[in-house]
């Protein structure tokens, strides 16, 4: 029992099958660097409280420095080279290794500290350590979408509702819709991190610490912006993990929708986009195939993100106060959620960067005269027809076009005189184009080329500031 941090109370060894069932080191070893950082701060707190001498504190700091170098080095026992040690958890591993490096002083390090608060601290530190990378990847994807939108602002495609052709829009406008979603995700992520950056250290197992710990100094040393205000809550709070996982899940859903559009538009039936070879694969049987596998995986991994969120929420829903061993199950979901969102952002940015546009195919699709039906109704409204009446008139026009396989722009003056006598100039109807339709929508947020370029530049500028 000596290898445990808690064995003094027990007279019998833990059952081997329970040992295997209860271990978490196989995945929480990812928290080792965070555990070292938290331990280093705790050394200072113990020294200030008079628990460890200056000499002991020096030995502990040197041991922690050597341990951190080991963890960051190529020979790290946690880098996947060889089997992991068979230990209960990361806290046990750090404690044992530190005693080998720093000597007997390491046995004082757990004074006034519980694994309950350590694991809460370590998970928060781990997430904070990935904050910069998250925002950098979001910035890259946003920047790529903004540049794509500006480059292809003049390429027109059909806009769709119910997956049916509706009105012509700029391809850049379409790309910017996803940029707006990502901007909201970015704001949610920033807000969620304000609740990650709360220091739980000093909460003890559940009731606080008897030591005179300077928690504000600990927060400053560890990069936290706030202090937990209730020790019971601090050791059992996983709201921050749920919030971040929700943001990752929603971001994943947004990128799943993006992936679906990109998959459709790169298919032979649409053929607006040509994916880069770097993010596509082929078929083992059909030589002609170019499959949008990167996008399909982005779409598929959104299910993992929703699953991770559900897992965390279900884990928490019936727990009594305060810490319970159930909370060991939070880390795999959180680690997977974080690594999945990092991967998805990275691949999505690469896809956008390497995608080419088939402007000719897009133009042919956007030239569908049915896409101009709303513009035709607007012309009638401008000449005094009530919109509901104009809507009905144009509906009859489109029905006639479908039945006779005609373009209303080719209708004769006599036909227009019969359809809308005195209310429509045949010349104006004949002159309608997708470009004119798009150009008319020049209000803020509209699809005009001018608006798209302005919004694209805004997105790129925002991305550079993330």
Image: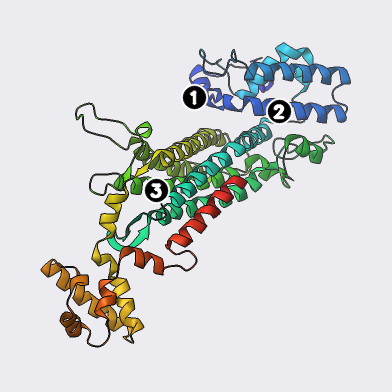
Tell me the tag on residue 420: none
Callout 1: helix, strand or loop?
helix
The N terminus, quarter of image: top right
Q: Residue beneath label 2, please?
A: 37
Q: Check disc 2: other Cα within 10 Å, few if <14, some if 14-19, many if 20+.
A: some
The nearer-to-camera label among 1 and 3 is 3
Q: Nearer the viewer, residue 289 or 308?
A: 289
The C terminus, quarter of image: top right
Residue shown at 52%/14% (left/top)?
81
Q: Residue beneath label 3, please?
A: 258
Locate residue 51 relative to residue 193 in the image: left or right. Answer: right
Location of residue 77 in the rendering, given as x and y in whole percent from the top left corner? 58, 15
Locate residue 194 relative to residue 358 in the image: left or right. Answer: right
Q: Residue beneath label 1, please?
A: 21
As drawn, 328 above or below 386: above
As drawn, 441 above or below 339: below
Q: Nearer the viewer, residue 400 or 281?
A: 400
The nearer-to-camera label among 3 and 2 is 3
Image marks 3 and 2: residues in contact by CB distance under 8 Å? no
């Amino acid at each position: 029992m000596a290898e445990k941090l808690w064995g003094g109370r027990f007279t019998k060894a833990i059952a081997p099958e329970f040992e295997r069932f209860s271990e978490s080191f196989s995945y929480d070893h990812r928290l080792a660097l965070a555990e070292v950082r938290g331990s280093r701060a705790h050394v200072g707190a113990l020294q200030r409280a008079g628990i460890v001498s200056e000499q002991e504190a020096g030995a502990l700091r040197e041991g922690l420095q050597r341990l951190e170098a080991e963890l960051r080095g190529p020979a790290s026992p946690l880098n996947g080279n060889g089997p992991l040690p068979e230990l209960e958890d990361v806290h046990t591993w750090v404690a044992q290794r530190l005693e080998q490096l720093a000597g007997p002083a390491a046995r004082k390090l757990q004074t006034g500290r519980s694994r309950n608060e350590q694991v809460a601290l370590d998970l928060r530190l781990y997430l904070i350590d990935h904050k910069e990378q998250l925002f950098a990847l979001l910035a890259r994807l946003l920047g790529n979408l903004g540049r794509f939108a500006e480059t292809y602002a003049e390429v027109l495609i059909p806009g769709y509702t119910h997956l049916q052709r509706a009105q012509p829009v700029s391809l850049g406008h379409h790309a910017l819709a996803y940029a707006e979603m990502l901007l909201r995700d970015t704001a949610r992520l920033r807000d969620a991190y304000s609740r990650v950056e709360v220091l739980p250290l000093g909460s003890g197992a559940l009731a606080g610490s008897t030591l005179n710990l300077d928690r504000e100094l600990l927060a400053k040393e560890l990069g936290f912006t706030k202090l937990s205000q209730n020790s019971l809550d601090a050791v059992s709070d996983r709201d921050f993990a749920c919030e971040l996982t929700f943001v990752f899940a929603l971001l994943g859903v947004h990128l799943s929708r993006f992936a679906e559009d990109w998959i459709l538009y790169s298919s032979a039936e649409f053929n607006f986009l040509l994916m880069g070879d770097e993010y596509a694969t082929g078929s083992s049987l059909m030589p002609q195939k170019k499959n949008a596998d990167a996008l399909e995986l982005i779409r598929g991994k959104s299910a993992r993100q929703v699953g991770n969120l559900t897992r965390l929420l279900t884990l928490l829903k019936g727990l009594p106060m305060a810490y319970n061993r159930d909370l060991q199950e939070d880390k795999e979901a959180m680690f997977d959620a974080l690594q999945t969102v990092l991967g998805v952002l990275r691949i999505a940015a690469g896809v956008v960067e390497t995608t080419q546009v088939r402007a000719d195919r897009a133009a042919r699709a956007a030239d569908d005269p049915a896409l101009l039906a709303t513009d035709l109704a607007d012309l009638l409204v401008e000449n005094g027809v009530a919109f509901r009446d104009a809507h009905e008139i144009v509906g009859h026009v489109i029905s006639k076009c479908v039945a006779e396989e005609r373009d209303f722009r080719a209708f004769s003056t006599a036909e227009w005189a019969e359809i809308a006598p005195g209310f429509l100039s045949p010349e104006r109807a004949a002159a309608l184009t997708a470009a004119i339709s798009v150009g008319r929508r020049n209000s803020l947020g509209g699809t005009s080329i001018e608006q798209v370029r302005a919004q694209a530049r805004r997105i790129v500028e925002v991305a550079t500031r993330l």
